[in-house]
Amino acid sequence: MIRNTQVTVVGGGIGGLTAALLLARAGAGVTLLERAPEPREAGAGLLLQPNGLAVLDGLSLAADLERHGHPLTRAVVRTSTGLPIVDATVAGFGTGLDHVLAVRRGRLLAGLLRAVRAVPAIETRFGCEVLAAHADGTIEYDGHRVRADLVVGADGTHSIIRTAGDFGAVARDTGTTYVRCLVDGGDLGLEGEYWTALGLFGGAPIGDGSTYFYAAAHAAPIAEALARRDLTAFRHHWTRALPLSAAVLDRVAGFDDLLVNDVTRIDCARWADGRLVLLGDAAHAMAPTLGQGANSAIVDAAVLSIEMAAGRPLAEALRRYADRRRPRVRKVQDTADRLARLSAVTGPVPRAVRDRGLRLLDRLGPLAARQARIAQQEDPRTLRAAVAALSQTRIAAAGLTTGKKPRT
Ligand SMILES: Cc1cc2nc3c(=O)[nH]c(=O)nc-3n(C[C@H](O)[C@H](O)[C@H](O)COP(=O)(O)OP(=O)(O)OC[C@H]3O[C@@H](n4cnc5c(N)ncnc54)[C@H](O)[C@@H]3O)c2cc1C
């Protein structure tokens, strides 16, 4: 079905760039529309997990990230005094898929964009804001009205494509806020996550002489410091709650270096409506506590392309994509919410009870390892093979779909 298919991808974030690349490799003609006037260097880090790495490796983009990123083989959550609450080995899925990779977000975006620009079947247009879309595949932007065989809404939490279609979407403000930042210094003693009286604080070196950190910002003293744009108070409160954060926070040059995000959860009853389909945050924005938002967007792009390439009619391909992705992502969103609630417990007694309970659960069965496996959503090995096979239309041979061979 994908040959002679014209796809418009709306949104040039991690999900949209990956989708453009994979759909084009599978044989579609792709136009990518991004409202930002030019590619942006998003000033933060990102933890790539085996599922996201599998897709990137299948696209031959992982090696560069591995060279410049920082691998993490353990997932450790500690108290503010450094006692482990959860300590798990990252679930292993074979060579290259046995770790989490902390990377600079800008490097991932730049690598994806370079790859997109190298594919003649993809036209990229920056500075194009889509203003309206219709289920027949018509979209409107900059005074243009054009029709595509498929419109992929990869336009993030506030998606216009989601608003335009009938997706049964519910957006819920979670009442949580997180701060992210990159600072100079690759050896500042931060690797892993700490659950403190102010909520979580975590991060890791990203392999290029910088350290990425993220922190909850919904506890009152932090929220007030942010509202006043008061970096000194922000540092003061965090350093009191978690002394080791001082080494990192002292390197924050100015308030504007902090990226502050309120978290909205998006649930959609349907992921497709006619010729419109959603992926990434547009379909399933979630709490960042599992580090699966971008990884899930990457997996969405892969599964959508695999289903599109399998030679079925469009409606069936989209139904299979949604049936496969929606329940798995829903589980991940729920787990991320649970972790957000657990990590936000502030009172000393409830925290002690929580920590003891989690340690006990972990001892009874490796809780974190099991959760991390479920969080991958697809077997990363199979995913990697299917993505690598996409451009050679050997998807069925890779064992991911049982459908007809694609038309060539
Ligand atoms: C504190 C924090 C830490 C996180 N850490 C991780 C992590 O470690 N690992 C992980 O996997 N995820 C993480 N995430 C989540 C991750 O950042 C997101 O899930 C991911 O970036 C979503 O990608 P996306 O491509 O779906 O959407 P976006 O990145 O939001 O991209 C959407 C794009 O669409 C464009 N756009 C929007 N509207 C229009 C329009 N009308 N027309 C044209 N273009 C449009 C936007 O300009 C944007 O470029 C974290 C999130 C937070 C808040």
Image (cartoon, rainbow, N blue to C red):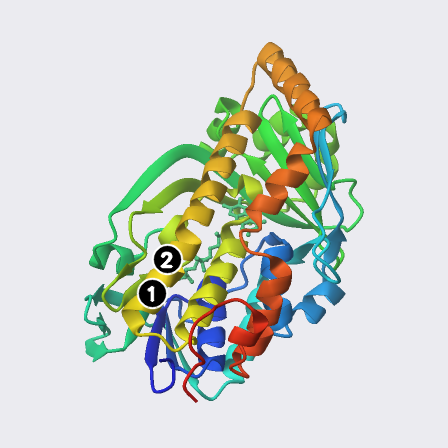
Contact check, label 1 and label 2, Cβ < 8 Å: yes
Q: Is mark 2 within 8 Å of ligand 1?
A: no
In the picture of the structure, the residue carrying the numbered disc 2 is 322
Mark 1 is surrounded, within 10 Å at the Cα level, by few (under 14), some (14 to 19) or many (20 or more) other residues, namely: many
Residue wearing tag 1: 318
Name the quadrant of the N terminus: bottom left
Task: Please tell me whether residue 196 is drawn above or below residue 208 in the rendered image.
Answer: above
- Total number of numbered labels? 2
Dot 2: element: helix
Query: Alpha-carbon distance for marks 1 and 2?
Result: 6 Å
Binning the other alpha carbons within 10 Å of mark 2 as few (below 14), some (14 to 19) or many (20 upward) gives many
Query: Which image quarter: residue 282?
Result: bottom left
Query: Does mark 1's beta carbon lie closer than 8 Å to ligand 1?
Result: no
Percent position of residue 92, x then y: 72, 52
Location of residue 358 by image quarter: top right
Q: Is residue 278 visible?
A: no
